[in-house]
Image (cartoon, rainbow, N blue to C red):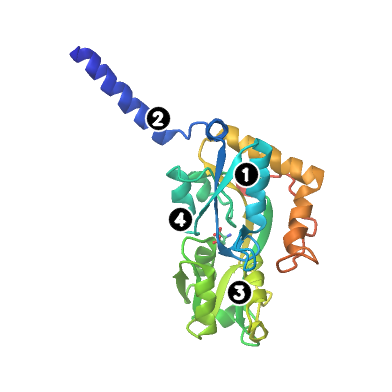
Amino acid sequence: MKKLGILFLALVFAAGLGGAAWAGDTLADIKAKGVLVCGVKDSTPGFGYIDEATRELVGYDVDFCKAIAKKLGVKIEFKTVTSATRIPQLVAGNIDLAACTMTKNADRAKQIDFSITYFSTVQKFIVQKGTVKKLADLEGKKIGTAKGSTSEQNAKKALPKATIQSFDDYAPAFLALQQGKVFAITTDESILANILNKAPDKKKYEIPNIVIGYEPYGLGMRKGDTNLVNFVNKTLLDMEKSGEAKKTFNKWFGPKGKAFPMNRGDFKIDGKKEAWES
Ligand code: GLU
């Protein structure tokens, strides 16, 4: 009996360890529970935000979650994440998928897995009109951004003498710029353009053509969750083939889109690997 007890304890211990090291099969779990839990932003215009008229959570990232849930034939549930909480939320199992303007990079890929790139942009700044012509004009200044972002890291590298002030999100960072508490804010151009577009005093600011980071977005999943990664990648490629990906882009960022118009250019969901992935 004692031996059996020890064996039981050993099994429980092994299962616990296994759970921590292996993501399991989230795809099977989602199908079994009939719901996909997606982590999205709720105050990032264009990508994940509350529509003022309908009070609904909408955006490019929200639409990709919905498309994946539809393909799976399950319901969708949204949980709000920030740049700093999204990876911990995923690792803790509180969300199945993170669709939240998240740049794929080698560092993050040590903790989670990424889908193929489904959007890409570059990192820039918002400044008061006429104050910045070149990167050096930003050196030594106080610059706002969000905690847990690549924007924070890239800015520290590009401007070693600047004071990088990290807020919980980009909206309070922009407010600090409007109040004259920071000299500039920095993050992805796709986010900056949409924030500026919604600002009543937008004429006072501009986004100079100064690039300090390449930001390809991927959907985040738990490390080793291969079945889900394959399913999501296949869905993204199918969306590109059927024209749904382009339609979704244009719905938000096209000339008649709901958010700030951006150039899709030649960017397609083609499944090509980023340099660090191959
Ligand atoms: N794409 C960048 C990142 O993943 C900046 C935007 C964000 O914070 O979500 O960190």
Q: Name the residue under label 3.
A: 125
Going by the numbered disc 1, the residue's amino acid type is: Ser
Cα separation between marks 4 and 1: 19 Å
Q: Is residue 95 above or below residue 185?
A: above
Cα separation between marks 1 and 3: 27 Å
| Residue drawn at 50 percent across, 45 percent down | 95
Q: Which of 176 and 165 is in front in this view?
A: 176
Q: Which of marks 1 and 2 is nearer the N terminus?
A: 2
Q: Do the residues labelled 3 and 4 touch (CB within 8 Å)?
A: no
Q: Do the residues labelled 1 and 2 touch (CB within 8 Å)?
A: no
Q: Where is residue 223 in the image (x, y as percent from the top left)?
A: 50, 39
Q: Name the residue under label 1.
A: 115
Going by the numbered disc 2, the residue's amino acid type is: Gly
* Any part of residue 274 in sight: no
Q: Nearer the viewer, residue 56 or 214?
A: 56
Q: Position of residue 250 (x, y in %)?
A: 77, 59
Label 3 or label 4, whichever lies nearer to me, is 4
Label 1: element kind:
loop
Q: Name the residue under label 2.
A: 18
